[in-house]
Image (cartoon, rainbow, N blue to C red):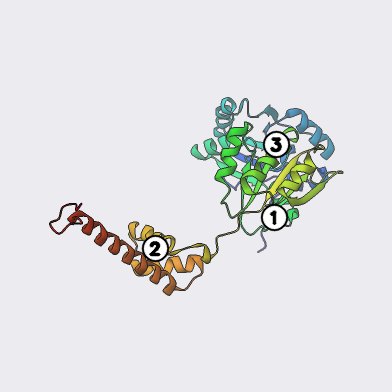
């Protein structure tokens, strides 16, 4: 027997009378990108928590939706205070919808605190997936996307920003950042300083909007380009650092990697095999490095022993 498909807004499990928290993605530019289920959720939710209630009303007007539930503001300034109120409504059995200005809640937007509190209270949490500036920028960047990390907005203060970027200099995954228009030049310069002026990157602005633009090139070149001003919502994608080649590892480095694994409880044979696999070098190369390092330690120990005995025939210092 074929089961009837639930209605678009019917996300609750049958027989579940507890509250439901729904995180819904909103368009990042073009309102036509709004998922069909978003309109139904806006129409049926008993409570709508919105990052900006004015932008929410514009969105509902563009979608031709008339919300029937209570609309509450939920933004960075009141997130901590309003979360308990929303959890209380959820515990009463309410259907609460969380939306932010653009993209998915919790991704550099309000949402994390409410989701964590709802899960802690045993409330079911689900999502209506929607557009994402992070994934859209990655797809358009022409940079590797098999492995990536999202770093959000870099720190505003120059010193803290420099330290944060310096800590990411060795990151091999493609990195995604958000940045404000008035800080983009400073940030691109700081990135060129931390990652190197020739590190490939892409500046994506106004994604899915009329004046969408993706500028690709080395960080130093992008920093110079941005000096004339960059408007709109900006996402920056930066290539990860090139992984070190096997030739970059000498005897001491190879032996040190093996020693670290041994210190963690791994047997030497398996540690050698693991390091060889990690670096893509023959196991024999790693084994020889370990042997050579041990030989060097032995020679140093002998030298130290000879020095302790003294240089003169009677064990004292001659001269």
Q: For the point 72% across and 44% down, which residue is it? A: 235
Judge whether residue 132 can be spotted in this image. no
Q: Report the residue marked by disc 2.
A: 255
Q: For the point 82% across and 40% down, which residue is it? A: 63
Asked which secondary structure carries label 1, the reply is loop
In this rendering, the answer to whether 227 lies above or below 317 is above
Q: Report the residue marked by disc 3.
A: 186
Judge whether residue 262 can be spotted in this image. yes
In this rendering, the answer to whether 287 lies above or below 25 is below
The furthest residue to the right: 210
Q: Report the residue marked by disc 1.
A: 5
Name the foreground residue: 234 vs 80.
234
* Disc 3 residue crowd, few under 14, some 14–19, many 20+, Cα 10 Å: some
Q: For the point 40% across and 59% down, which residue is it? A: 256
Residue 171 in the figure: left or right of residue 6? left
- Mark with earlier residue (1, 3): 1
Mark closer to the observer (2, 1) = 2
The picture places residue 121, in percent across and down from the top left corner, at 50, 37
Name the foreground residue: 193 vs 165.
193
The picture places residue 70, in percent across and down from the top left corner, at 69, 28
The picture places residue 293, in percent across and down from the top left corner, at 36, 64
* Disc 2 residue crowd, few under 14, some 14–19, many 20+, Cα 10 Å: many
Mark closer to the observer (1, 3) = 3
The quadrant of the image that shows the N terminus is bottom right
Tell me how far mark 2 sits from mark 1, CA to CA. 60 Å
The furthest residue to the left: 314
CB under 8 Å between discs 2 and 1: no
The picture places residue 191, in percent across and down from the top left corner, at 65, 44
Residue 132 in the figure: left or right of residue 19? right
Q: How many marks?
A: 3
In this rendering, the answer to whether 45 lies above or below 15 is above
Tell me how far mark 1 sits from mark 3, CA to CA. 52 Å
């Amino acid at each position: 027997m074929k089961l009837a498909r639930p209605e678009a807004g019917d996300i609750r499990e049958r027989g579940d009378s507890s509250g439901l928290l729904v995180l819904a993605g909103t368009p990042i530019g073009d309102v036509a990108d709004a998922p069909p289920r978003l309109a139904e959720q806006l129409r049926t939710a008993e409570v709508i928590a919105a990052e900006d209630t004015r932008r929410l009303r514009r969105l509902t007007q563009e979608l031709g939706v008339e919300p029937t539930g209570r609309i509450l503001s939920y933004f960075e300034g009141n997130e901590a205070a309003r979360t308990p109120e929303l959890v209380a409504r959820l515990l009463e059995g309410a259907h609460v919808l969380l939306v932010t200005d653009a993209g998915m809640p919790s991704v550099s937007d309000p949402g994390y605190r409410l989701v964590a509190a709802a899960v802690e209270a045993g409330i079911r949490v689900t999502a209506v997936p929607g557009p994402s500036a992070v994934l859209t920028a990655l797809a358009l960047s022409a940079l590797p996307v098999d492995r990536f990390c999202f770093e959000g907005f870099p720190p505003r203060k120059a010193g803290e920003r420099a330290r944060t970027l310096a800590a990411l200099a060795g990151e091999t995954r493609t990195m995604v950042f958000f940045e404000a228009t008035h800080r983009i030049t400073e940030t691109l310069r700081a990135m060129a300083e931390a990652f190197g002026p020739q590190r490939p990157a892409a500046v994506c602005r106004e994604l899915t909007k009329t004046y969408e633009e993706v500028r690709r090139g080395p960080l130093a070149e992008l920093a110079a380009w941005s000096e004339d001003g960059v408007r709109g919502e900006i996402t920056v994608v930066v290539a990860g650092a090139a992984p070190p080649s096997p030739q970059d590892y000498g005897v001491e480095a190879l032996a040190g990697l093996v020693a670290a694994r041994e210190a963690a409880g791994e047997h030497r044979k398996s540690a050698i095999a693991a390091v060889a696999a990690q670096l893509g070098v023959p196991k024999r190369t790693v084994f020889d490095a370990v042997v050579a390092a041990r030989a060097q330690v032995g020679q140093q120990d002998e030298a130290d022993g000879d020095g302790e005995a003294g240089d003169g025939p009677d064990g004292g210092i001659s001269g």
